[in-house]
Amino acid sequence: MSKPAELSCSECGPLNCYRQDKTYPPFCLTEAADRQQVESVVELLRGDNLDGRMARAAGEIEGLYYGKATRVEEIILFAKRIGAQRIGIATCRGLIEEARIFVKIVRAKGLEPYTVVCKVGSVDKREIGIAEEARLQKDAYEAMCNPVLQARLLNAQQTELNVLIGLCVGHDSLFIKHSAAPVTTLIVKDRVLCHNPVAALYASNTYYKRLLEPDQEAEKKP
Ligand code: SF4
């Protein structure tokens, strides 16, 4: 018998924590939260530390530019509000042209971009034990994505905000784990949906019904 689903915010109808104009559900995470913990977060974000500056910058940009600034513009606004001058760009090689355009924009706005591509270091996939069947092209040198080196090179450049451009799922996780600077995302990779992954959710009752069905075939594992 499968475990009953645990109730959390995704099962909440009123979302009362936003405006407090409805009622909280019985399983509400706001009501259950340790008030001291909530207070300690408020205390942290009220301060003049980077967390506080980021929280205020993000909240102010949301309020002041709601529906007006594109994400590209929001990233520039955010960088400026937190005082980040050195902008690291961790890009996928497949999106290098988009990264080049973003670099021009960053420079035009008076900031300093520094880009590292995912294949940096040029280490063949075999070297970390990626199976032959998982290579895209069997008879050619095929460098792995190297998000850890991407992050380390940007750390060495002392970038103050790192921007992800199309890193793969998982490579982005590794980059974020190893980045010294805060990370934001300009483009998330979705090779099927032209980097617009939300389309799969919008079409999950039609073209992508399979998403709501239990997995039929065993996961492909080399
Ligand atoms: S915190 Fe409470 S009110 Fe807010 S979404 Fe979660 S369950 Fe709903």
Image (cartoon, rainbow, N blue to C red):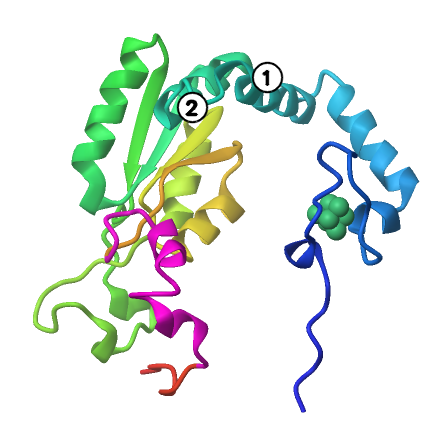
Q: x, y percentage for residue 6?
A: 72, 68
Q: Judge from the rendering whether residue 180 lies leftward or rightward of residue 74; answer left or right.
A: right
- Give above or below for 84 relative to 120: above
Based on the displayed image, in which of its 4 quarters is residue 136 positioned?
bottom left
Three-letter code, disc 1: Glu
Label 2: element kind: helix
Q: x, y percentage for residue 209?
A: 36, 70
Three-letter code, disc 2: Ile
Image point (26%, 57%), residue name: 123
- Give above or below for 199 relative to 40: below
Q: Earlier in the sequence, mark 2 or mark 1?
A: 1
* Residue wearing tag 1: 60
Q: x, y percentage for residue 22?
A: 78, 40
- Give the spatial CA distance, label 2 vs label 1: 13 Å
- Give above or below for 48 relative to 38: above
Question: 180 or 165: which is nearer to us?
Answer: 165
* Residue wearing tag 2: 75
Question: 78 or 89: which is nearer to us?
Answer: 78
- Mark in the foreground, 2 or 1: 1
Q: x, y percentage for residue 173?
A: 47, 52
Image point (25%, 74%), residue name: 134
Q: Is residue 222 magenta?
A: no
For the N terminus, the image quarter is bottom right
Which range is magenta? 192-214
